[in-house]
Amino acid sequence: MRKFLQRLKPLVSFSRKIMNNGILYIVFGEKYEKLAVNTIAYSRQFTNLPFYILTNIKNRNNKWKNISNITFKEFNLPIEQNRDIKTTMIDYSPFDSTLYLDCDSIITKPGIENVFDIFKNNDLLFTLYGIVDASNQVNKYYVATMKKLHISFPLTIYYGAIIGFNKTDQTKFFFSQWNKNWKEIGITREMPALACTMKLNRHLNAKIIKLTDNIFAWPINPNAIIQHEYGKGEDFWKPIFPDLYNS
C-alpha cells in the first residue's frame, strides 16, 4: 500500500499545480513580440500571477528571461493562425481560471487578482462594448457574420482584449462554437463570431462588466487596472508610461 501511495504523489502534486489562476497571452509574429516583451515586463511589477504565453516565435527576445513566473507554449504556425489559437485558447491554458489579455494591453496598477473573484461563479467574463441595432454604423464584418449565421439585431458586442474563463463544460462548448462559427464565416476577424456565438448561446453563465468598473480601459483611463490601445507601440505608450520600455 505504501508503494502504491508513493506512486500517486506526483499525480497529487500535479493536480495542485494546475488548480490556480493565471494570465494568458497570445504573441504571434515579430511585431507583436517586440511589443509584448515590453508590455508584459512592465505588467509584472503589479502582480505575481503566472503568465502563460502562446507563441509562434522560436528565437525569442532575450528580455523575456528577465520576467519571472512565465511559461511559453510554442506553435509551429504562421502568424495568420493566431485567431485559431485565440478561439480555442481554453485547450491550451494550464489554469483552472484564466484571464486572457491582448499583448497590447498593460497592467498599470495592483488589483488584477481581484478580477478572478468577479467571475469565480461564472463560466465567462466579458467587457461590454455596446448593444447595436440596424440603425447603428456597424462594422461590415459584423453584418456579414450575422447574415451568415442567421443572426438578427440587436446584437451585443464585447471587447476582445480581455476575456476571463473558468474550465467548465459550458465554457468548453462556447469556445468550440466560437471556433466553428469563426471558421464558417471564412476565418476573418474573430470578434463578430464571438458576439454571434454569445447570442446563439444565451444560456451561458457570463459575467459582463463595463468600462465604468475601472478594470479595463480602451481608450486610456488612468483609474483602470488594465490599459489597452489596439496595436500601438513605443511611440504611443512611452509618453504615457515612460518606464515601459525600460522595464
Image (tube, rainbow, N blue to C red):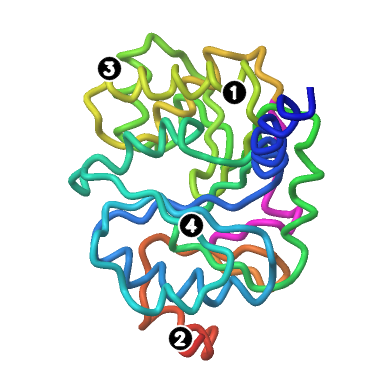
Mark pair 2, 4: CA separation: 26 Å
Instruction: State the SS at label 4.
Output: strand
- For label 4, the residue is 71
Q: Residues within 10 Å of mark 4 (few under 14, many from 20)?
A: some
Q: Residue at x 75, y 50 (%)?
A: 115
Mark pair 4, 1: CA separation: 23 Å
Q: Earlier in the sequence, mark 2 or mark 4?
A: 4
Amino acid type indicated by mark 3: Glu
Mark pair 2, 3: CA separation: 40 Å
| Mark number displayed over residue 184 | 3
Amino acid type indicated by mark 1: Thr
* The image quarter in which residue 10 lies: top right
Q: Is 73 covered by the magenta stretch?
A: no
Q: Earlier in the sequence, mark 1 or mark 2?
A: 1
Can you name the residue that lies furthest to the top here?
A: 150
Amino acid type indicated by mark 2: Lys
| Mark number displayed over residue 171 | 1
| Mark number displayed over residue 238 | 2
**Left or right position of 195 against 137:** right
